[in-house]
Image (cartoon, coloured by chain):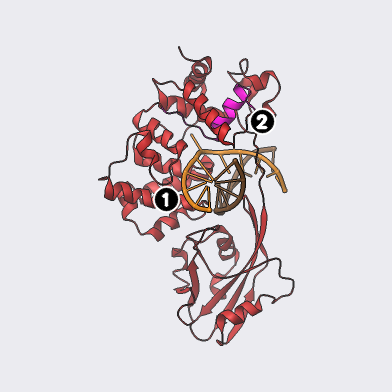
Chain colours: A red, B brown, C orange
Amino acid sequence: MKPDFTRKLLQWNKDSNTRSMPWKGEKNPYRIWLSEIILQQTRVEQGLAYYQKFIETFPTIQHLADAPEKEVFKCWEGLGYYTRCKNLIATAKKVAYELNGVFPSTYESIKELKGIGPYTAAAIASFAFNEPKAVVDGNVQRVLSRYFGISTPIDTTTGKKLYQELAQALIDTDQPAAYNQAIMDFGAVICKPQSPLCAICVQNQDCEAFKHDLVKQLPVKEKTLVKSTRWLYYFIIVSDDEVYIRQRKGKDIWENLHEFVLYEAEGPVHTAFQELPFLNGFLGDIPFSIWHISKMFKQQLTHQTINGQFITVDISKPLPTGSGYFQVSKAQLSDYPFPRFINMFLEETASPARLF
DNA sequence: AAGCCGGGGAC
DNA sequence: GTCCCAGGCTT
């Protein structure tokens, strides 16, 4: 006997769900995996073009595993949460080189792979292998929180466990793929975060939040976002036709992406050249001349506000080795993945070539 | 358990 | 501006 919720959800899915996505109904685990990694904390509309590009560039997991890391990151450029890309590469190599190219086929074995947690493992296991494992993403938490009137915060250990168990109890074990797809579509199309379509919702008579006018208050989130502001001053050090860049390392934003010579200040630089001591120290006794100072750029990230300027500096002889940066010709610059913040400058500058 | 990781779209 | 998105990893 199916729960009423499940029955009505599947009925809605059959009758009214017109949501269409390229990976819907997909059975190839590589494609499912790829789409799920791209869509982690990412809207479908934003991830779609990236999915298409990845499938085109890397038709199989073997292609992905064999590709140079830089090329894969270049495909991921601009999508954010770059650890996903690093884990994507690691898992592709694992499957291609250690598992004979065969994607693991059970929830438990899939979850062992890097970058795959409970949600993604359940998605792949159900979509590709028909394993009755319920997915719990932001959509599912919202739908269940409202339908059952649950105010347990979704971002706590207790909440996560509760929603996982509830979802598992509701899944249609005869058609887990259809059920998992349906509840996420339902959350995205009907039970939306803002302005949900309660008036036309087939579940509204049974929905606790709707009955008690709690829709706007559910689900509950406990943690509040802490934001910080940073000031990044990038020196575009030009020597002949070459410019200096490096790959970002360490646990910070934009890990593995590239950048110019960075001076990070504690706060806004008030005078025009408060950052000059850094430049003098960095260049040592190499003569330089400043060619251009950009406007102040600003970018709002989820948890940080980035401010910064780009200062183009011409030097007469190359940097000594050991600076931590390497030379790239301006023509090769676009081969390297950069954060959006830097691309904002590169794209907006009317004639970037003039700066180099 | 808490903190951190991007970028974009809707409001 | 705020919220949140087909979350997961590190500490």
Q: Mark 1 = which residue?
A: A87
Whether residue A190 appears in this view of the structure is no
Quadrant including the C terminus of chain A: bottom right
* CA neighbours of label 1 inside 10 A, class few (<14), some (14 to 19), many (20+): some
- Residue type at numbered disc 1: Asn
Say above or below: A205 vs A67.
above
Say above or below: A249 vs A137.
below
Quarter of the image for residue A286 reads bottom right
**Residues indicated by labels 1 and 2 sit on the same polypeptide chain:** yes
Image coordinates of residue A255 in percent, x first then y, are 50, 59
Pair 1/2: label in front? 1
Whether residue A315 appears in this view of the structure is yes
Image coordinates of residue A264 in percent, x first then y, are 62, 68
Which residue is more in the foreground, A102 or A290?
A102
Disc marking residue A195: 2
Point out the stretch of residues depicted in magenta: A133-151
Say above or below: B8 vs A68.
above
